Amino acid sequence: MPWETSHAPRQHELDACVTCGLCLPKCPTFRLTGSESASPRGRLAAMSAVASDIAIVDSRFDEIMSFCLQCRACEPVCPSVVPFGRAMEGARAETAAQLPHRARKLRALLLGPNGLGSRAAVRVATLLAAVGQRLRLDKLPVRLMTRISGLRRIPLAPQSHLGVLRSSVGERIGSIGLLAGCVQDSWFGGVNDAAVELLARAGYDVHVPTGQTCCGALAAHDGAVAGAESLAAINAAAFSEYDLVVATAAGCSAHLAGYSEWTQSGAAVEDRARDITVVIADAIAAGRLPTLPPRNQEVAIQDPCHLRHAQRIINEPRAIVRAAGYVPVEIDPDGMCCGAAGIYVLTNPETSDELGNKKADQVRASGATLVASANPGCEMQLRTNLGTAYEVKHPIEIYADALRSSYRAAGA
Amino acid sequence: MSFAADLRAVLADDQVLDHPLDLHVYAKDAGVTPGIVAAVVFPESSEQVAAAVKIAAKHEVPIVARGAGTGLSGGAVPTRPGLIVALTRLNQIEEVDEAARTAWVGPGVINLDLSAHTMPLGLHYAPDPSSQSACTIGGNVGTNAGGPHCLAEGTTVSHILALELITAEGEIVMLGGAEPDPLGLDLVGVVVGSEGTMGLVTRILVKLTENPPEVRTLLLAFDSIEAAAAAVSAVIAAGVVPAAMELMDQPMIEAVENFKSCGFPITAAVLIAEVAGHPAAVDSEAAVVAQAGRDAGATEIRIAATEIERDLIWLGRKSAFGAVAYAAPDYYLHDTVVPRTRLVETMSAIYEIGARHGIQMLNVFHAGDGNLHPLVAFDAKEPGMLERVKAAADEMVRVSIGVGGALSGEHGVGLEKRDLMGEVFSPMDLDAQARLREAFDPKGLLNPDKILPEGSRCYDFGLVANLEPDSLK
């Protein structure tokens, strides 16, 4: 048997590819290199070669798979609907199992239940990042440190939303279990603030259950199967009783939408999983949240891949920004990856920087200085590459800010 | 030194691939037949292409050019261990001359990217193959690609003014020129459509076409494919050459509606016609098309009133290929041309062939220029299926040739149709083509085994004097 794990690329997934090549121009790594081996079709051909014993999982196979951003931009254009992201997670599971080198084991630890899944570990990382920001350690020529410049200002004692319980305002629509997110909770607290407030106003009882943990997306993308499975199981139990399970990071909501791969009770989560932008945009459309007066200011829309490509959520962030009174501005008709791509920013720095610079150029060309991005990884990448003259926020924060200031104005 | 070591001596590490896994990845294009690859190079300049060609020539390794690998006839796949020259990094759009309406482009430029780039100038690159979002201009030059809008505008060859070519010896030469009618032999015409057998094209001077100021897109429904085909001939006979005339049969309409729901009527045949040009002209031309349709018995005629309606009609047409990929695990897309006047009988014959071989067939085609694209949806895992599909394909091509048609409309001959060349060309024709090819490529290293069947270069011209022309076939 060429494959060793139950997550390995499946024959029906590989057979679905008709090798038409329509995915190639949408793939950022193919665009950068012009290489078939760096394209979705080529990667599927490499997986098929292993599946049919023509090739083995060797270091070249690993390189080919590791170069993929897992942005899934190939999926919407695929006429045969190949579940490429799923197959790629399977290939990563195989390289992790068959070529377990030290860096990979360390990553599995950091991305698993004792890393991102551990509140204590995240607290230590948060404190280090907060201290690092104050000592200007982002000036150090160390990749991990330079990334601190992409973070929001982290308080030394950050608030957690875990345990928050907020009742609906006005007519009750249903209950929502909010996934706070591993680093979202302490590093991007403003997004969860906005989420709790807006969801309650939109008629939901909001609960952020304490029994939850990291969604496991980063572990799954990296082939850290055991970690991804145990994190998914914990969350499936923690979120069993809500009408909807809502995530405030695109990467998390996309991963919840594929939870049946990772835990037995995952299907029940999948059906109820929503990205926050969908719930808020629906509430605005239904008139449960107000449309605010226009303010004639432009907001550049950056589409996180796991929102646009993985979940086909395109209109919602724009609708939210528009309802906040702003004018959404398109920066990239293809919605090409910004290069953050989870831990890709650390594992493939050159490619990540190249894509990050392109994305920053697109934002600059738009003329807008406020950028809406619905995923923390993209937000950090944008801030790092754009510098301090630009502001990057989640669309629901932009809306919540506008809503708050309209209430203040009404009160004054 | 070994072949790969020689390549690495002139190219950077990331410009050469020779790991077995990469060679396997490069062994196929969008066609059905895999090949054998010795190495892949990614040159970034004409000089680097020339250098790679020289090294391959020294080692006597066959040389195959490749763009996006969307070709369907195996043109980019080496039949024996060969060097793939991936031209994807020669993707610069340089020197757009707005006044002359031309642009110098690299062969790796994606077809649709070029039109998007020149859109602000009100210009576009006219040939629009269905794969235009992915295929490259270099590949289009190789196959003389067409597309729906080639009815009025002509295929790729009508849009290429000059080419920079790397010869089999690794020389860099310029063919054609910016002037409308360059002196000397039409060598650009020889190279376009030659599928990399005459040299490797590294720079291309393309014509850009003005975006039509006004467009009318019509959708006509018919209760028989014959009636639709008759309408096509009637339109041309009426003296109107629409920008495009595309026909879809019922199985294809159903597949498309299932895939994208574009609001097409489910009926025996749908004809999409587009007239483009001066605002004063398009309405009267659209009226001629509509009248021809009514006379031929159209059951419904729609004229797109908005840009959205027009886009929806074209989305339906351009999704045809995806719809089939969606519906079946494998497909085989044919490409033949018949005289427009013989469309009806050819279609009947093709349906009969499909039914006899028990294969599922869907039809969409460039009806205006008689370019047929029967699409066979099948599952290659079914025992004997691939053989049945290939046998039916063979018969369909023979039928097309029988009514005076051509072997390939726009996909190229490649490997797929090589052995049918003898059906169209006499031994003397084939020999002449082989001699022409030999003049460009004496060692036979440029995409060998493609287009011309084995033994093409063996006609003894000494016999000509003793034979009547008819007996040459």
Image (cartoon, coloured by chain):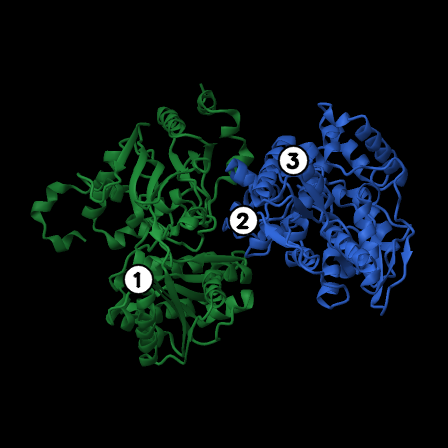
**Residue at 56 percent of width and 36 percent of height:** B21
Q: Residues within 10 Å of mark 3 (few under 14, many from 20)?
A: many
Q: Is mark 3 on a helix, strand or loop?
A: helix
- How far, Cα to Cα, is label 2 from label 3? 27 Å
Q: How crowded is mark 1: few (under 14 residues within 10 Å), some or many (20 or more)?
A: many
Q: Are the two marked residues, 3 and 1, in contact with CB atoms closer than 8 angstroms?
A: no
Q: Which of marks 2 and 3 is nearer the N terminus?
A: 2
Chain letter for the blue part? A
* Residue A69 horizontal/vertical position (percent): 64, 41
Inspect this view and state whether residue A261 appears: no
* Residue A361 horizontal/vertical position (percent): 58, 39
Which residue in the protein does label 1 denote?
B369
Name the amino acid type tagged 2.
Cys
- Chain B in the picture: what colour? green
Which residue in the protein does label 2 denote?
A23
Label drawn at residue A385: 3
